[in-house]
Amino acid sequence: MILPIYVYGSSVLKKETEEIDRTYPDLQTFIADMFETMAHSEGIGLAAPQVGKSIRIFVLDASIFAGDKPELENYKKVFINPVIPERAGEKVRYNEGCLSFPKLHEDVYRESRVRVQYFDENFEKHDEWFDGIVARIIQHEYDHLEGKLFVERLSPIRRKLIASKLKRITKGDFSASYKTKL
Ligand code: NI
């Protein structure tokens, strides 16, 4: 089922999130819905708060980058209760978007490598390093679980410059090719 995506201004994007365990009701359905919603909106990552659930889970799909990086062919992953104990490498700049900010793209600096401890959809525990675009997506989505939005990582000047665009989103004055909610 395609779920509506909460956009900037929705309080759920700032709400504290809770860890879940394997008894979480209809978890596999929810995960399938997240993938379906992400594909429908042509996203590469989606965190639970963006579909109105204050729980610690996000999904990513980096398959679109397989042209440059064949190892990302059909690269889809689920992260449950993720923790980032370490980040490493240079801070790199990348033009990010976010489904909760329709049509807004801004350069954000983030570390190039990240270590993540998480559970997958079968509640198998993992402790792995990621780099490149996958590390980028993970850090963006992990921020959502912390109630932190990518515009909060911009310089104060840059934020000022896009303030009116941001205000328009909070008023529902935007267009998106997918279902949204405020
Ligand atoms: Ni986002």
Image (tube, grey):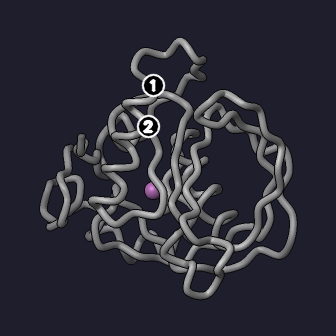
* Residue 14 occupies quadrant: top left
Horizontally, is 165 left or right of 25 in the view? left
Pick the residue in front: 5 or 124: 124
Kindly identify the amino acid type of the residue bearing the numbered disc 1: Leu
Residue at the spot 58% in from the left edge and 62% down from the top edge: 75
Above or below: residue 168 compared with residue 148: below
* Residue 118 occupies quadrant: top right
Residue at the spot 33% in from the left edge and 50% down from the top edge: 36
Ligand 1 sits in quadrant: bottom left
Pick the residue in front: 22 or 83: 22
Above or below: residue 17 compared with residue 10: above
Residue highlighted by disc 2? 31
Where is residue 144 drawn, in percent x and y? 52, 46
Above or below: residue 153 compared with residue 128: below
Which dot marks residue 141? Answer: none
SS for dot 1? helix
Residue at the outermost top position: 23
Where is residue 11 drawn, in percent x and y? 34, 36
Q: For label 2, count other residues whose C-alpha is less than 10 Å away and answer few (under 14), some (14-19) or many (20+).
A: some
Above or below: residue 56 compared with residue 165: above
Which dot marks residue 27? Answer: 1
Residue at the spot 55% in from the left edge and 86% down from the top edge: 67
Residue at the outermost bottom position: 68
- The residues tagged by marks 2 and 1 sit, at their Cα atoms, a distance apart of 6 Å
Kindly identify the amino acid type of the residue bearing the numbered disc 2: Ile
Q: Quadrant of the N terminus?
A: top left
Q: For label 1, count other residues whose C-alpha is less than 10 Å away and answer few (under 14), some (14-19) or many (20+).
A: some
Where is residue 127 drawn, in percent x and y? 83, 43
